[in-house]
Image (tube, helix red, strand yellow):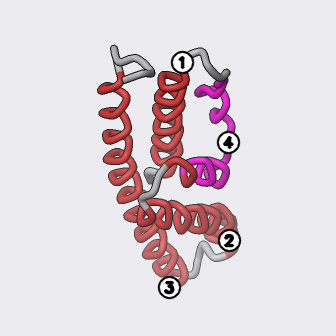
Amino acid sequence: MFLQCVEETIKDYLVEVYEIIKKKLGNQIPFKFSRKSVENDSLGRLLTKFSKVNSNKDVIDRIGRLIKNRNYCAHRAYVMIFRQKFDNKYLSDEIEKLEKIANNSRECFIRLQMELKKVSEIKNKLRGNTIDK
């Protein structure tokens, strides 16, 4: 699944935004956020930060659903492996749910890549510009 890719892309997005803010602030106000400030954040915490600097409600909602789905995967893994391993109907149903989660995580990743591209383009436009422009 693309769950880790989603997390890393949100981190990349936040770092791009932080760099834009630093560029715009110059030395007027200290701004000490960096990749290090998001490196160990959970997906839920990353979503909270992301939603403060992104207005794409569809992407934000998809990530929110993905968090619930990821937790489902983690909790159901034990049951699938140890308790229900001989129940073919149960396993078939769970595999179907996992495939839907995988599709959602892939879609989140694709949409996040588009958002990252937008913010990267903004940052690139700011290169060489001063705070006064």
Looking at this view, is 82 or 115 the one in front? 115
Cα distance between the residues tagged 2 and 1: 53 Å
| Crowding near the residue tagged with mark 1, few <14, some 14–19, many ≥20 C-alpha atoms within 10 Å | some
Cα distance between the residues tagged 4 and 3: 37 Å
User: Who's the residue at 50% across and 51% down the image?
Assistant: 3
Indicate the amino acid at tag 1.
Answer: Gly
Task: Classify mark 3: helix, strand or loop.
Answer: helix
Indicate which disc residue 79 carries: 2
Cα distance between the residues tagged 2 and 3: 14 Å
Cα distance between the residues tagged 4 and 1: 27 Å
Residue under label 4, please give it: 41
Mark 4 and mark 3 lie on one chain; the one further toward the N terminus is 4
Mark 1 and mark 3 lie on one chain; the one further toward the N terminus is 1
Q: Does 34 sit above or below residue 104?
A: above
Residue 11 location in percent, x, y?
53, 38
- Give the extent of the magenta segment: 31-50
2 vs 1, front mark: 1
| Crowding near the residue tagged with mark 2, few <14, some 14–19, many ≥20 C-alpha atoms within 10 Å | few
Residue under label 3, please give it: 89
Looking at this view, is 53 or 109 the one in front? 53
Name the image quarter holding the C terminus: top left
User: Who's the residue at 49% across and 35% down the image?
Assistant: 17
Q: Does 70 sit above or below residue 35?
A: below
User: Who's the residue at 34% across and 34% down the image?
Assistant: 122
Indicate which disc residue 26 carries: 1
Mark 2 and mark 1 lie on one chain; the one further toward the N terminus is 1
